[in-house]
Image (spheres, rainbow, N blue to C red):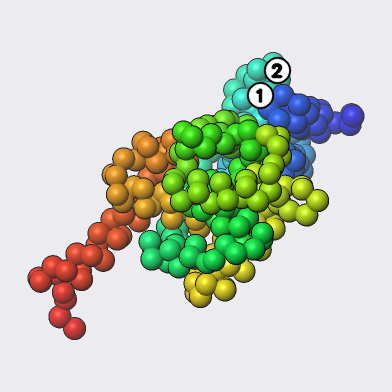
Amino acid sequence: MSDDPLAQGIERFAAYLRHERRYSPATIANYTRSLRQLREYLQTQGVTRWREVRGEQIQAFIARSHRAGLSPGSLRDMLSAYRSFYRWLAREGGAESNPAIGVRSPKAPRKLPQVLDVDEVGALLDFPANDPEAVRDRALLELLYSSGLRVSELTSVRWRDLDMAEGLIRVTGKGRKTRVVPVGGKAIAALQSLREQDSPGADDPLVRGRLGKPLTPGAVRARLKRRARDQGVLKRVYPHLLRHSCASHVLESSGDLRAVQELLGHADIGTTQIYTHLDFQHLAKVYDAAHPRARRKG
């Protein structure tokens, strides 16, 4: 371990995320990179220990990073890493306060997620399942859309996690949080065909590639891209697009934001609220097309 107290803190925090929180390697790498960048800056300010850091120093580093071209989203992720680090450091007795709490990142214009409409989803999924590969593709696409799964959730799920009779599936999402979500009738039928074809064991991956191993997220994206091209869907289609589409269609039909939050596994309902903007956007289009006094004179 390094003799530098700043570097030691980062190494210990990374070990905590790895062994106790069981974060993914990619998340740990992002947190570590953000903290090392901050450490380099702090060293130019004469800071030798994490407890010496002041909020204005973190704010100055964020401002400098913004001037260097980092996006508001990247800066927000950096601040999240710093706040998490200092929460852990306070529990360890390495800091008395969290200097990142009051620091703000520049606001980014909020981008609305793209979605497929119901007809486009129908066109995407309406392909004949007349060979083993097509049976598998139909099952994985139906499940992605039916249950709003993240691609990482899809590729890690096992047959034991699926309850065909009840139409439910247990998935593990971000932060190793487990939730149980419904599976629609068409997805159940597609999964039943897949099970009859593959005769899997309870511990086998739900969607398998070669040699019985789970499909990778990259392989799922490739399959989806190919199916979209073959089905004549002109939009760029990717797994998260089906998740967005599922959420938007459920909210549009039910108006139940809490249910959509639970379906998607969002910790904060504010994350889910972006789909209300999509719903209002759809309403505005319908209104403009249908209301006799909505049309503006050209």
Q: How far across and how far down the image is residue 246, in percent?
A: 43, 51
Front residue of 244/296: it is 244
Q: Are marks 1 and 2 in contact (CB under 8 Å)?
A: yes
Q: Amino acid at mark 2?
A: Glu
Quote the CA–CA distance across marks 1 and 2.
6 Å
Q: Amino acid at mark 1?
A: Trp
Front residue of 15/236: it is 236
Front residue of 62/8: it is 8
Front residue of 86/280: it is 280
Residue 43 appears in which quarter of the rendering? top right
**In the rendered image, the vertical position of residue 50 relative to residue 291, given as above or below:** above
Q: Residue at x 34, y 40 (%)?
A: 257
Name the residue tied to disc 2.
Answer: 92
**In the rendered image, the vertical position of residue 154 relative to residue 281, given as above or below:** above
Q: Can residue 19 be seen?
A: yes
Q: Quadrant of the C terminus?
A: bottom left
**In the drawing, does residue 268 fall left or right of residue 22?**
left
Q: Residue at x 16, y 76 (%)?
A: 296
Q: Quadrant of the N terminus?
A: top right
**In the drawing, does residue 21 fall left or right of residue 56?**
right
Q: How many neighbours does mark 1 have within 10 angstroms: few (below 14), some (14-19), or many (20 or more)?
A: some
Q: How many neighbours does mark 2 have within 10 angstroms: few (below 14), some (14-19), or many (20 or more)?
A: few
Q: Secondary structure at mark 2?
A: loop
Q: Secondary structure at mark 1?
A: helix
Q: How far across and how far down the image is residue 82, in percent?
A: 63, 35
Q: How far across and how far down the image is residue 283, in percent?
A: 25, 59
Q: Can residue 60 be seen?
A: no
From this viewpoint, which residue is outermost toward the bottom?
298
Q: How far across and how far down the image is residue 222, in percent?
A: 66, 63
Name the residue tied to disc 1.
Answer: 88
